Image: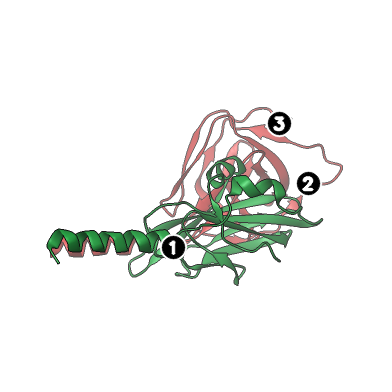
Amino acid sequence: MRRGLALLLLLGLAACAQMVTTEPARLEPVGATEAPTVITVRDKVDILLDTRFSRTLLAGTRWRKVGRLAQGDVFRPVDGVFSIEGRQVHEAYLVISGASLRGFYLPGEANYSPLVPPLTLNLGDPR
Amino acid sequence: MTVPARFRLVALLAIAAVVTGCATGPKFSETSASMPAVKAGDGRIFFYRSNSMLGAAIQPDVRLNGEVVGPSKPGGYFYVDRPAGAYSAATSTETEKTVSFRLDAGENKYIKMTPGFGVVVGRMVLSVEPAQTAQTELATMSYVGMAKK
């Protein structure tokens, strides 16, 4: 009986994942005359989201600058796709200021999701 | 009827129920070369579901921005072409697990459906997958939809 209740409670908690924190964001796209910028994540980075879900940026993954927000420059994967997860799943681009991963731009809904605390990335020279 | 015979009958019925619920259309590997081209300004969204026995009886509709676009069947895939823009996909089992994404013109997006179980009902967890992973998984899957707008 107790085990059954514990299992039910666990299932209930699992079903109540937190929503990803978001705020509206207006992406300023990279200008047509701006030189393309690609960065490389040199070291693997594990990201723990405030929803308790985690994501990993693998070493060697490349990201292309597609625009900027007030919080930083916005990069999407060159090959592949990246997402963050809470109660919902959201395709996500990285928002980077200097070498600091500040959060994520969610292109499917034009929102920004902050990463707290920010993470420092080891990035290759932009080219 | 003896107990073993009854057990065999129940097992056969269960297998038949699962098999008849699985996708049986042409395989992706046979049809991908003959898929129609995407028109200018549109992208293509593939939906697919692994051929797992887990939750095989759960076969909800798939919704894209609220519109039903096809079924979720084990081992099945379908695709729709849509103008570039922002999209949200979900299944009709419950509203909790949606996936939001951006579709660019000429881009292919791959949405995978994986059965999971909520507290009350079974559900589909949707995820957006890299093209390389998705195309490997799609190879053995069967078409279950209509390529229409």
Decide if residue A47 is in sight here: yes
Q: Earlier in the sequence, mark 2 or mark 3?
A: 2
Which tint is chain A? red
Contact? badges 2 and 3 (CB < 8 Å): no
The answer to whether residue A107 is seen in the rendering is: no
> Which residue is under mark 3?
A126
| Residue A105 horizontal side relative to residue B52, left or right | right
Q: Residue lying furthest front in this view?
A: B1
Q: Residue at x 68, y 27 (%)?
A: A125
Name the foreground residue: A105 vs B61.
B61
Residue placed under numbered mark 2 in the picture = A30
Which chain is painted in green? Answer: B
Checking the image for residue B21, the label placed there is 1
| Secondary structure type for disc 1 | helix
In space, the residues marked 2 and 3 are separated at their CA atoms by 15 Å
Q: Is residue A121 above or below residue A21?
A: above
Residue B1 coordinates in the image, percent (x, y): 15, 67
The chain letter under disc 3 is A
> For residue A116, which numbered disc appears in the image?
none
Q: Amino acid at mark 1?
A: Gly
Residue in the picture at 76% in, 54% down: B38
Query: Could you tell me which chain the residue with mark 1 belongs to?
Result: B
Which residue sits at x=60%, y=45%?
Answer: B29
Query: x, y percentage for residue B62?
Result: 54, 66
